[in-house]
Image (spheres, grey):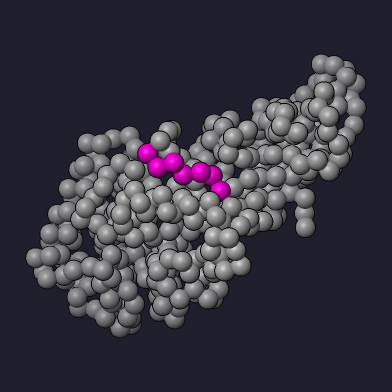
Amino acid sequence: MRNTRLEVDIDQFYENVSLISSWCGKEILPVIKANAYGTYLNHRLDVLSSFSIVAVALVEEGVFLRQLGYQGVIFILNQPSVDEISTIQEYSLSVGLCDFSFLEECIKRDSSFPVHIEVETGMNRTGVSLSNFSSFLDFIQKSSLLLEGIYSHFSSADTDSSYSKKQISIFQEALEIASSKGISFRYIHMSASNGILNYPLPFTNLVRPGILLYGYEPYFQASSKIPVKPICRLVSQITFLKTVSKGEMIGYGQSYTCLKDSTIATIPIGYGDGYRRELSNRGEVAICGVLCPIVGNVCMDSIMVDVSGVNCHVGDDVILMDSSLIPLEKIASICHTIGYEILCTIGSRVPRVFIGGGEDGKRS
């Protein structure tokens, strides 16, 4: 196996699930889109099978889970295209629904599969507006589709309480319209990670944690409410050591000049693995418990690190991301992005090594 790896702690994942469940008292709908936020837990049938329903973003992600052997409800968060209707039915997927043209095509084909109606409450991405909601319900009732759920999505549950409360009010109005037509839903959900932390929503029975499941804060100090912990550690090894004289330059573009005679380590990870070029001459790694600066530009397959004064050797572990020395949030800040993006874009060339969980995915 390659000496660069992403370690994923399954026991800590279960602990995070337990903490979130205790906090909100609702059924958990784990969001495992984008390869479970880059962790590849969506490849672990034993882990998935501990949930009765899971959520992905794309129909093809749902097909992957069904082919893996997952027997529970697979919910597609995003409105699919009409070209995917036959696949949705073939693989028994549940889908988010908000498009009249998609609904019309389902009626033409007499399609029958579960749907969750998405209500537009202010995200302004997808969803049925409140003004069209009643007629949309009437239209669905003319079809063979199965009304399984209703949902919406907060746009700023961590920053704007007045706007979030307005979104909640709109969603509740949609529920009242459905109730007036004698319609009830198995699943009612609105809160992702930020909403879970800030709005209890007693009228819902399901929550959709994403980044929180994996132990990372959706916003600063969110973990003070639910003390989740990161499940991932990105690790590599020193593959080469050399002495570079004062005044010599390192890497492509000669972006770093040694100010003194230096010991430079080469580490086999680069932007081809999703390790960002923004970390060139700005990021750090931890070797033997010491923070060491990245020097020179990040290459496609490697980085160079100044290890002068560190008693290290070829083959020693290098911590590129963990919960303390090199937290995900620190890397994201250097790259002027969010932790979600950093985690999701760790490349497929990096093996995922699962820690704990036991043979059947339960706590060992």
Q: Residue at x 63, y 45 (%)?
A: 233
Prevailing secondary structure of the magenta residues:
loop
Residue 315, placed above or below residue 134: above
Q: Residue at x 44, y 81 (%)?
A: 90
Where residue 182 appears, as percent x and y from the top left, is: 12, 71
Quarter of the image containing the N terminus?
bottom right
Where residue 217 appears, as percent x and y from the top left, is: 46, 40
Task: Choose top left, top right, bottom left or bottom right for residue 194.
Answer: top left
Q: Residue at x 11, y 69 (%)?
A: 181
Q: Is residue 282 left or right of residue 170?
A: right
**Outermost left residue:** 180
| Whether residue 246 can be seen here | yes
Quarter of the image containing the C terminus?
bottom right
Looking at the rendered structure, the number of numbered marks drawn on it comes to 0
**Outermost front residue:** 364
Q: Residue at x 20, y 72 (%)?
A: 139
| Whether residue 43 can be seen here | no
The range drawn in magenta is 225-231
Residue 293, placed above or below residue 259: below
Q: Is residue 279 left or right of residue 101?
A: right
Residue 259, placed above or below residue 82: above
Nearer the observer, 162 or 16: 16
Nearer the observer, 74 or 345: 74
Q: Is residue 183 left or right of residue 231?
A: left
Nearer the observer, 170 or 285: 285
Where residue 212 appears, as percent x and y from the top left, is: 44, 47
Where residue 61 appears, as percent x and y from the top left, is: 50, 66
Q: Is residue 126 left or right of residue 249?
A: left
Please check the rendered image and state whether residue 285 is part of the magenta-colored stretch, yes or no.
no
